[in-house]
Amino acid sequence: MFRVELYLNPLRGYRKKWPSHLTACASSLFFLGPTAYMNLSKLLSIPPVRVLRDSFRSMDLEPGVVPEILEALQKKMAHWSLEDCTCVLHFDEIPLTESLCYDFKRDKVIGFEDTGTKRSDKVANTALVVTISGLSKRWTQPIAFVLSRTKIDVAALEKLLLTLIEELQPAGVLVKAVVCDQGGCNWDLSRKLGVTLKEPFFIVKGERVYFLFDVPHLLRCTRNNLRNVSALRIGEHTVRWSHIQSLYELPHPLRGRLLRRITDRHIYQSLHGNKVTKFAAQVFSGTMSLAILVFVSLLQLDPDAAQTATFCDRMDQLFDVLNSKTVSPSKPGSFGFALSADPDPKKARKCQDQLDFLKSTASWISQWKFDSKHPPNTIRGWQLTITAVLWLWNDLCQNFGFKQLFTRRLSLERLGAFLRKCRQQHWSKDTPTASQFIVAFKSILVDELFVIPGRSDGEADISVLLAELKRVPVSSAARMDPEEQSEDPLYDTGITTEVQSGDHHQLVQANVRYVFAGRIVHLFQNRFPCGTCCPNLMSRDHKSTSEHRLLESLSTQIFGEHSSGVTVPASSCFQFVVGLEEYFGKYVAIVLELENVSKQLCTHLMRVPDNLFCSPVCKGVFVGLFSRLRLHWHLRLMNAMLRELPASRERRNPK
């Protein structure tokens, strides 16, 4: 640092290139204290924050676990208390558009199913994201993501979670709970882990890890199940959605004053309304319960609707207990405050009332019977989650010294916010491609990483990202969309991708190959000007043969005023490219999902016989240009075919 200061200090005020070792050292200083680093930069010649951010944006990010995060967490939490190191692990999925992208710098096709340890030839349409969040301190850290086809295999998911929990323990991070939604794969995972209603946990290295379902998701499922059946029977009582709908449709003027926030999206099914937790919470609320009782007393509703009012009020209290974010109740008689182990008798009595309410509610939910052929998983999901929260709170109080627990930190809220940011990185696309998702994932990691933390209480809205990513910048090509890569000179062939039909198809295909061969020769001549090979590759009279006379019209229509730059390949060179094309079609499906795909492909293409090149080095350069350029166009054709699949059209245009 001293030697660098002696060299760079006279250059202050001038634009300079920062050494890579200085950037790495400066990054370590920044994460130890961002505010101190900002003040230090005024005295010393160290890279500004903008330079550090740009260096991290070009980092390599692969599916699976990011190992640098584990090292950074161990350094960050070295002086934290046991309570602050306790966290919850969240995982959820985001749909992806089926698309493949060739990263020419890493020589890898992005978009195939990839768990970090195993790749397959299936095109991924789902990304699984795993984060950990603090239970005492408010912090969030994405630690892994996986690309999968439709649903990740249960065995692979179990291996991923157990590996993460085991690797986090030596780093000082104690995972005490796993939270997810009620997807079918997640239910299979709970059974595979041995989770039951009596023992809602599994053991990893002697530590209990409790399994919970996301409470907002459970509330939405309860609303949807009640709306889809005629009735819900609880012992001798009957709950009907028709009572709520009849209340909403009443023309009475008092109805609008009691239910000011209720709209059609709350009552009737819609694609957007089914996914919004706020709509379900406003239906199952104390306000809705009061409104039903008022109109029952006015003889405007069936007297049996009073049972529906009781159901709404109890669900409101249950959601308040399992979604608390404040220390004290927001309104008298509410359970919407944190679980507390305060020795004060008054607060201890309130906490005991919460725990007694949860126990009685679990017994109450066990009596639910929907009028359907099969009981929904929501019933068992509520029971499992309530039991797990009771066990978790008892464990945290006795073994980790917890004084309070905000149950809202157990939900997928922070992971959902992270996934929304990933979508918004690409113009709010609900289904980004795999390459777009990875770019967004990396961009958000870097942006959050460089947020200077300020003084705030434990319930600050901005989560502090804790990890320091030190991976050496390898590739920036992953930041480009498949369509954007065509702007690179290597991929700019000028050839249209429009599919021809009729008797002229073979003629057009042959002439397109001719133009393609000329493009390869042009690139070879510019990038590897060999005086011996180049004359053998180009036509001596620079005119196309009679069977490729269409080249002249193609060069005029496609290249326009730049038609003079079209390279006419020699006949022998064209036949060599045709041979490469045959080998490419034979082996591309075998090597497409492998690492170093172009290198793997070149090992097969080098077997095509020729007498054009002076050395194997020249032939290898020519074959390498062909394989990379041909891979790009092959993936563009595959993406066009994927977009035409019925499942892909349904994802883009949902009903």
Image: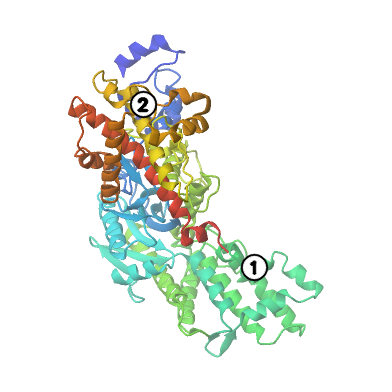
State whether residue 51 is above or below residue 195: above
State whether residue 234 is above or below residue 585: below
Q: How many marks?
A: 2
Residue most toward the right? 253
Please name whichever residue, 615 or 217, is drawn nearer the observer in this view of the structure. 615
Left or right of 187 in this view: 351: right
Question: Residue at label 2?
Answer: 522
Dot 1, crowdedness within 10 Å: few (<14), some or many (≥20)? many
Dividing the picture into quadrants, the one containing residue 608 is: top left
Q: Going 43% across and 49% down the picture, which residue do you hit?
A: 639
Q: Position of residue 167 (x, y in %)?
A: 26, 51
Secondary structure under badge 1?
helix
Say if mark 1 contacts mark 2, CB within 8 Å: no
Dot 2, crowdedness within 10 Å: few (<14), some or many (≥20)? many
Q: Going 44% across and 15% down the picture, which residue do you hit?
A: 15
Question: Residue at label 1?
Answer: 266
- Label 1 amino acid? His
Please name whichever residue, 365 or 148, is drawn nearer the observer in this view of the structure. 148
- Label 2 amino acid? His
Find residue 197 and name its label. none
